[in-house]
Image (cartoon, rainbow, N blue to C red):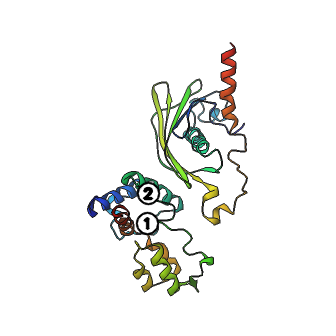
Amino acid sequence: MRWFWVDRFVEFKSGESATSIKNVSLAEEHLHDHFPGFAVMPGSLILEGLAQTGGILLGEKNNFEHIVILAKVPKIKFHSFACPGDQLRYHAELIESSDEGGRVTCTAHVGERLVAEAEIIFAHLDNMDESMSQSIDQKNFVFSMGLMSILDVDTLSQAVNTDS
Amino acid sequence: MPSEEEILSKVQETLIDALGVDDDEVGPEATLVGDLGAESIDFLDIVFRLEKAFDVKIPRGELFPENLASKDAGFIKDGIVTLEGLDELRAKIPHADIDKLAADPKVENIQDLFTVDMMCKFMVNKLGS
């Protein structure tokens, strides 16, 4: 399995907001253990999907020049569940951004139903104090490890849907 | 410009939200790291929230200067902040109570400069200028 917790972006307003979708599938191994007889997507992975949506939103604003890492989740509230067959819709709004990082507020919905809402703070690891920035390989491991291919899905989907 | 009471109240609200502390913990003398448990990333969070609450831009390092105790700075000898170091701190963070540090200038006391009152003084200067 690969660490993609978003399937596709459906809307992207540079520096402002992004909306993505995640289709929950029974093919995902962990749903058989979480929980036996009650398959629901783990909240931590919903948070990861929100963070990937918000993190790419922040990264794109700076042309993916910074190493964007999830630094802090000041607020997260789960209101409901997402189970196999559901399509989660993640929406993130960029509230603050600076050289050091950024802050997003985000929501996860299945249809009209609110599943989770959160506030996430990202840090630019390459711009943190010396002790931190020296301890990492300067290569941008966040955006160079394939996460960006989520954006290719969008292009692919547009092409496929236009042809048909 | 808001009154000093209004500034204190907004600063306290900011800390309650950012650090998840109770309102009776954020008295003016409370230290951010020692009393309120702030960690490095929290300072970024706090700055974001202050910018929003007061509608101002706070450049990096202006409110919470970084690397104050770094070896390269040369202001620390045998775990004690030197007189030059104290002068440097006065220049760098005029909103902090350096005299209090001067009374017991151990390196580990540097972090106690970051108090609720220090944040309020910073905001008063910032909004007044």
Q: Looking at the rendered structure, which numbered label has been put on residue B32?
A: 1
Residue B72 location, quadrant: bottom right
Of B125 and A32, which appears nearest the observer? B125
- Give yes or no for contact between labels 1 and 2 (Cβ–Cβ under 8 Å): yes
The residue type indicated by label 2 comes to: Leu
Of A78 and B62, which appears nearest the observer? B62
Name the spot of residue B94 as percent of width and height, x first: 42, 74
Residue at position x 68%, y 29% in the image: A153
The residue type indicated by label 1 comes to: Leu
> For mark 2, what is the residue?
B19
Give the mark, 1 or 2, whose residue is nearer the N terminus. Answer: 2
Name the spot of residue A58 as percent of width and height, x first: 57, 44
Mark 2, other Cα within 10 Å: few <14 / some 14–19 / many ≥20: some
Residue B70 location, quadrant: bottom right
Could you tell me which chain the residue with mark 1 belongs to?
B
Could you tell me which chain the residue with mark 2 belongs to?
B
Residue at position x 60%, y 81% in the image: B74
Label 2, secondary structure: give it. helix
Residue at position x 35%, y 65% in the image: B120
Name the spot of residue A101 as percent of width and height, x first: 55, 52
Mark 1, other Cα within 10 Å: few <14 / some 14–19 / many ≥20: many
Name the spot of residue A131 as percent of width and height, x first: 64, 66
Q: Distance between the residues labelled 1 and 2?
A: 9 Å
- Which quadrant: the C terminus of chain A? top right
Residue at position x 38%, y 56% in the image: B14
Label 1, secondary structure: give it. loop
